Amino acid sequence: MDDEVLRAVGPRLRGFRQSLGLSLDELSARSGITASTLSRLERGLVRPSLEQLLPLARVYGLPLDELVAAPRVGDPRVHLKPVRKDGLTFIPLGVHAGGIRGFKVIYPPSGVASPVKYNTHPGRGWFYVLSGTVTLALSDERTTLGAGEAAEFATTTPHWIANAHKDRPAEIIALYSVQGERVHVTDI
């Protein structure tokens, strides 16, 4: 690593810790690195070693390259691997590093109505309809959203999202947060 990259590591480490709302003591307990060493790392008073960066990368759920902002080499494209679950296709929109997770979700044509399966989990959900029409059910209330519309809700409320059409697919961009952050959309 060159000196410029190493100088930037401390502030990056502090930023990752603060974004997760962790104190130095909490991070110390999770990483096995003393709070005083973590403080010195974050202030740039000591150079990080691989033995220190590996446990921090595990705590933050990041690859080492991203943790230290190593210069990119080679192909800059992100290769997204779709996951199919319950008839839906989920395409992750980045590396999960805690906080908000993003997905493109493709709902196939609804065809024969499948049984409604409500979900609940900690956090918040937000989605934007790219194409087609979806139905959002929150407890017993149903809302139909078309392309260009968005919704946000507490995922502790029993909910489900389904394609509203039997012959056309629907696509959404969905953001989920276990920590409960809200997505703020502003007019530009």
Image (cartoon, rainbow, N blue to C red):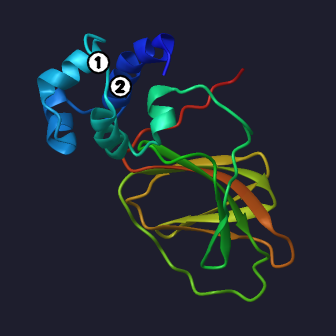
| The residue positioned farthest toward the right in the image shown | 167
Q: As rendered, which of 84 and 46 lies closer to the eye?
A: 46
Q: Position of residue 99 (x, y in %)?
A: 42, 42
Category of crowding for the residue at label 1, using alpha-carbon neighbours closer than 10 angstroms: few (below 14), some (14–19), many (at least 20): many
Residue found 63% across the figure and 26% down from its top: 186
Q: Is residue 180 above or below residue 129?
A: above
Residue found 34% across the figure and 41% down from its top: 54
* Apparent side of residue 32 relative to residue 59 in the rendered image (left or right): left
Q: Amino acid at mark 2?
A: Leu
Q: Is residue 37 above or below residue 21?
A: above
Q: Which mark is first along the chain, 2 or 1? A: 2
Q: Position of residue 132 (x, y in %)?
A: 81, 61
Q: Which secondary structure lies at badge 2? A: helix
Q: As rendered, which of 127 and 101 lies closer to the eye?
A: 101
Q: How many circles with numbers are drawn on the protein?
A: 2
Category of crowding for the residue at label 2, using alpha-carbon neighbours closer than 10 angstroms: few (below 14), some (14–19), many (at least 20): many
Q: Is residue 79 above or below residue 118?
A: above
Q: As rendered, which of 185 and 140 lies closer to the eye?
A: 185
Marking on residue 69: none
Q: Which secondary structure lies at badge 1? A: helix
| Residue assigned mark 2 | 13
Residue found 54% across the figure and 27% down from its top: 70
Residue 47, quarter of the rendered image: top left
Alpha-carbon span between mark 1 and mark 2: 6 Å
Q: As rendered, which of 143 and 68 lies closer to the eye?
A: 68
Q: Amino acid at mark 1?
A: Glu
Q: Does the residue at mark 1 contact the one at mark 2 (Cβ under 8 Å)? A: yes
Residue 106, quarter of the rendered image: bottom right
| Residue assigned mark 1 | 42
Q: Position of residue 177 (x, y in %)?
A: 44, 48
Quadrant occupied by the C terminus: top right
